[in-house]
Amino acid sequence: MRYSFLALPLIAASSPAFAQLRPLIEPPASAASALSGVDVFLINEGTQPAEVEAPATIQTMARDGTTLTIELIRSTADTAPVAPGGFARLRYRLAPVARPAAPRRVIAQASTPSSTQGEDVTTSARGTASGFLARFSPFEPVYGVIGTGDAGAKVQLSFAMQPFASTGPASYIKVAYTQTIFWALNQPSGPIRATTYSPEAFIDVPVGDSARLAIGYRHDSNGGGVANSVDINRFYLRANQSVALGRDWRLDITPQGWFYVGNQGQADMIERFYGYGALGVSVEQRDGIKLAVLARGNPVTRLGSAELFASYPIKRFGVGDVGIYLFGQAFHGYGEALTDFNRVDTHARIGLAFTR
C-alpha cells in the first residue's frame, strides 16, 4: 500500500493538533477514485494522547499525477483522542468545484480517465487481480431487497465502463450491463423465478455544465430458448438535466424515448405495455436521502408501470463509516420481470444497496 506525504506541510499548518499527529494519506488512483473517498491516517508517535482536529480540506496528488482538493467527511471526524502509539482513520472525498453554475462539472471531469493511467492491482486470498478500475462507474442501482408474499427477493447488479481513456470523441463511448434477479422465497425450494439480462452500448456526451445526452442500443432478454424467449431490442435517445437546489441538494430529470428493432420472441406486443418512452425524476442530498421514480408506458393503451426507490446512507445512523445504503423499492404495473411484461404486479421490498 502506498501513502503520500505531499500534503503534510499544508496539514500541519492548518491545525495545531496535526503537529502532534503524523498524517499518512493513501493516494487515490485518480479523481474518479477520490469521489468514493480517501483514507487519511493520523499516527500518534508521542507519549501523550492527542486530540483530533482535522482540517476541512487537504490538497494531495493522485497516483496519475492529478492535483486534488479533498474535503473531510464530517461523520468520520467524531473520534476520541488518539492514544500514544495509536492512530485515527479519517475519511475525505473529492471536493466539488466551487462554481455554483456548474454543479456537475466535477462528475463530468472525473468520468474521463487519464489516458496515461495504468491498471489497478489488488491482492486477496484468491490471488492477484487487476483492471482499469477508474474506467468503471455506477449505472443502475446495485441492491438486494426482500418483501412479503410473492414479492420475494429482488437482486440487481449493474455497471458502466468506458473502454477508451482519452479527451477525444472516443471517450464518450460506454458499455453497460445490468442483471436483475427475482428470487421466489415464498416457495418451498426458493427458486430463482426470473432473470433479466440487459447489455447496452451508448454514446454519452455533455451538453453544457449540467446536462448530458446519450444515444444507444439496449438488449433485454430472459435468456430463454426458442420456445420461451422474451427479448427487447431498442435504440434509444436519453437526456439528463441536473439542477442544483442548494445545501447539497440536487434534482435530476431524465426523459428517454426509444423504438424497437428485431425479433421480440414471445413478446411480440410488448410495446402495448412498455410504450415508447420513460421519465425518471430523482431528488437527493449528498450523503443524505435520495428519492427516485421511473415511469414508463403507452399513452394510447394506458398501460405502463412506475418504480420508486428510496435510499439513505447507513453511516448516518452513527454506525461508523459503512459504505452501503438502506434501500427501499416499490413497483406497480406491467413488466417488473421481463417475462411478466403482460401481467400487473404490485410489490414493495426493503434491503441494502451498494450504489443508488
Image (tube, rainbow, N blue to C red):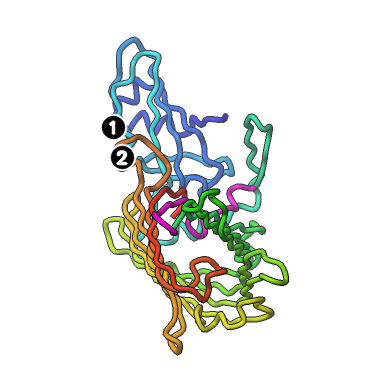
- Depth check: 350 or 254 in front? 350
Find the magenta span and give its range: 132-150
Q: Examine the image and state in which quarter residue 7 appears.
A: top left
Residue at mark 1: 78
Q: In this view, does 312 lie above or below 41?
A: below
Q: Residue placed farthest to the front in the image?
A: 188
Residue 74 pos. (x, y %)? 31, 39
Disc number at residue 74?
2
Q: Is residue 96 left or right of residue 200?
A: left
Instruction: Confirm or deny contact between disc 1 and disc 2 (CB under 8 A).
Output: yes
Asked whether residue 102 appears in the rendered view, the answer is: no
Q: Is mark 2 on a helix, strand or loop?
A: helix
Q: Residues within 10 Å of mark 2 (few under 14, many from 20)?
A: few
Q: Assign the C terminus to one quadrant of the image.
A: bottom left
The residue shown at (42%, 73%) is 333
> Magenta stretch containing residue 62, yes or no?
no
Q: Examine the image and state in which quarter residue 281 appears.
A: bottom left
Q: In this view, does 184 lie above or below 278?
A: above
Residue 258 pos. (x, y %)? 55, 80
> Magenta stretch containing residue 140, yes or no?
yes
Q: Is residue 224 above or below residue 156?
A: below
Q: Assign the N terminus to one quadrant of the image.
A: top right
Q: What element carries label 1?
A: loop
